Image: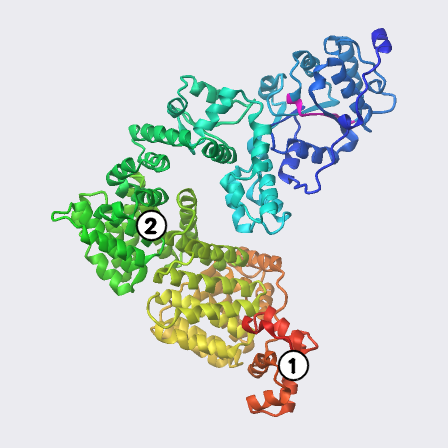
Amino acid sequence: MLKNHDISPRRRVPRTKVTIPDPPLDLISRPRLLAALDGAEQSMVFVGAPAGYGKTVLLADWASRHRGTVAWVSADAEDNDDRLFWSAVLEAFAGCAGIPAGNPVRSLAVPASPSADLAFLATIADALDAVDEPVLLVVDGAQEITEPGTWRGLQALLRHQPPGLRLVISSRQEPQLPLVRARVAGRLLEIGANRLRFSPEEAGTLVGTTGPGIPPHQVGLLVARTGGWPAGLRLAAASAARQGNLADFFAGRDRAVLDYLTDEVLAPLTVPHQDLLRAISICDEVPAGLAVALSDRPDAEAMLRELGEPSGQVVHSVGIPARHRLPPLLRTYLRAELLRRAPERTRSLHAAAARWFAEHDLPSSALLHSVRSGNTTRVGELLRRHAVDLFLTGEHNVLRLALAVLGEKRAVSSPLLALVSAALHLERGEPSSAETQLSCAEVAWPAEPTAELTVLRQLVRSRLAQVDRGPAQSVRAAEQIDERLAAGTGLGGLATLHRIGTLTARRDRASAREALSRVADAAENADHHFLVTQCLVALSGLAGSDGDYLEMDVLAHRVQVRHAAHDPHRSLEGAQMSAQLAYGSLLRGEAAECVEHAKQIGRMLGDAPARAARNLGLISETLRGAAEFELGGWHSGLRRMRRARTRLGTGRSFSAEHAAWCAMLEHRAALRLGAADQARETFRWAQPIIAGSGELLLMRARTQLRLGRQGAASAVLRSLSEEDAPMLLPWAGIEASLIGVRAALAAEARERAVRSLDDALRAAEPGDVRFPFVFAPSDVITFLTARLGKLGSGERFAGQVLAQRRELRTPPMPAPLTERERNVLRLLPTQRSIDEIAEDLTVSPNTVKTHVRGIYAKLDVRSRRDAVATALRRGLLDTEVGDFTG
């Protein structure tokens, strides 16, 4: 018997202290973390991260799934009283259903010094050893326990840890437990800040519960700005709910966010630590040594290392020598508050940073901080010395800021800066502004220009032709670039890139790829990010033209990563990259992904007036329309494609290849929906632009098949191989083979259908071109399914296609309206009577009534008003008729 235990009662403990907290109403469950906790075999779990990382929410969600075996203790400062802490632990055990009624921990008394009473601890260990299933003892918020005496009891219990106990600790700092020993022995599962950060998908789920204040396309930016910090994301959601958008949140102006950061993150720190954080907040990244220059503290580096320890994790440090970063949200708000409270100190800190970066040969950072310090003299000096190199390295935003601060008069008085400004305007698709800057450079042109200045002017003229002129002018401008002169400057690689365009124009793609790869490698070695990405965009486009769609996608994703790191806003380069990603997504049959990439093209272009920007925007609309069509937005998707084609016009400002896939996608969709007039219109538009191409023959074959003339369709397809009609689009051959399958099936020529299907599978699998299969008509899918088990090497690809098609769950396509029904439908919003409509269409009233009944049946409506509303929703009518009230 333990006599002391019998006579020492437990301290009274509030019920809420030993109760698993209820998850919040807007709980975002974390399956990946719950799975890690469930699958852990370690005897100890440590969930450690600073405030706001969702430690309690995660453990409460997990514990609520294991209520019968969980003993929960919410720690607070009173647990520094040893007897109160162990009283809470025993009360938590007593509330655990997994511990039998007669188990000693239910009645065990607490001695005067429980952590030092080995007999008391041994009794607990023996009692837990007797339970059938291990008990999870969760100590949440353990950073509140600072008294070593309280921890000694848990340390002693862990030394001889009973099999019936698993200890789970959550804390903002490492507890006074033998974690190192547990790590080495493999007995510790750790979930730290990095694992607790929200992924973009989890953040998207959270944002989806907050209403319209945060559009989906901003989720990625939000995750980047918050570092995936759960509290930061919730604060953003609350800010968006109050303001209707994230402007104040991103600018560091939301008072509620500042209050949270002050109370939860800064308050526990000393005043010197807080001052140091404010000083370094002016920099996105603080290289080793800069903190000393900003703070005038010789011990600044040591203080930053201290703030980066697991106990605080306020500063993230990487590399040797170390580079330090504040969490993005904390940095934004400290910087904004510093500027608001001490603008003069802010400018002096930027000036100090500019000097330090200039001394360490880091011109981009030196220029940025010179801009922020307001020192225009230093800005001008740095621009004249480094502008060309900064343009090549992709620091375009910094250059734009610097030129804006320098002022128009100072900038245009220098031909170098005027040309750099023109080049920057062109990368945003602004040719008129570029021409103005080019004219200013001409006015200020020196009598004896340097080689760099001469070549830069040639490059600007060449880029202007690429962006806003026709292909022939682009070739002529590129041929005027003096590569030999450029070779002696830093512009040699860019000059070569422009000249490579002439190889592409001559269809010498092999030479163009080889040259582009050489330029990209040299630019990578020189850290010329802009030049590298330009080469990758060009290589991706060539890969797509050659039918190597997998390589196209890989290269476009490489550009995406680089672009996000340097210039995530408006640029032609970003729009081209998004177009390639959208095209690749569509060809893989990922229609929803294609829509998102196509939307991104519009965001990258804004209202840029350049011809290249307009063409990219309209091409993106075709891709988006085709994807929306396949997702079930048949009428709206088809209308989007038609609008894009109409706006493209009939000129030759775009390539025949682009015209071919715009026509192929729209023609295919129009025939499937029964819009024969639009299909004819599309064919006539494409005919002069892609004359002599195999795509024109393919569209003829489609039309013949739609008319039920399978013999004529087969004859047209045969002529594809017999005539000199090359395909502009490599994937169009797959489409031709599948049309051949349908024609053969309609003619009951099964063997021919088998050969055509095998041809299509062989052509599609290497490039993972699933689009023609995933969205094929039902007769092709039925035949493909029947052929499973007999497809040889195409078996795996066919299975993937069919599985992808099943996952789409697209509703069945509605019966198409006839052309006459469409004509009647267009007149329904006008409130004309049946007789008046009949007169307009020169038919009898009874014929109009028959067409109206057909429209009602196909739209599943019962009135004219409902017919108009449904037709508007499906994209069958112009939105201008939306005010119909009759």
Mark 1 highlights which residue? Answer: 854
Amino acid carrying label 1: it is: Gly
Residue 99: quarter of image = top right
Residue 137 is one of the magenta-drawn residues: yes
Q: Is residue 247 above or below residue 753?
A: above
Between the C-alphas of marks 2 and 1, the distance is: 54 Å
| Horizontal and vertical percent position of residue 494 | 26, 48
Q: Is residue 559 above or below residue 761?
A: above
- Determine which of the numbered discs, if any, sits on residue 845 in the image: none
Helix, strand, or loop for circle 2? helix
Specify whether residue 321 is in view. Answer: yes
Amino acid carrying label 2: it is: Gln
| Horizontal and vertical percent position of residue 276 | 46, 24
| Horizontal and vertical percent position of residue 80 | 70, 15
Q: Nearer the viewer, residue 265 or 877?
A: 265
Mark 2 highlights which residue? Answer: 534
Q: Is residue 142 above or below residue 557?
A: above
Q: Residue at x 30, y 57 (%)?
A: 509
**Of the residues under marks 2 and 1, which one precedes in the sequence?**
2
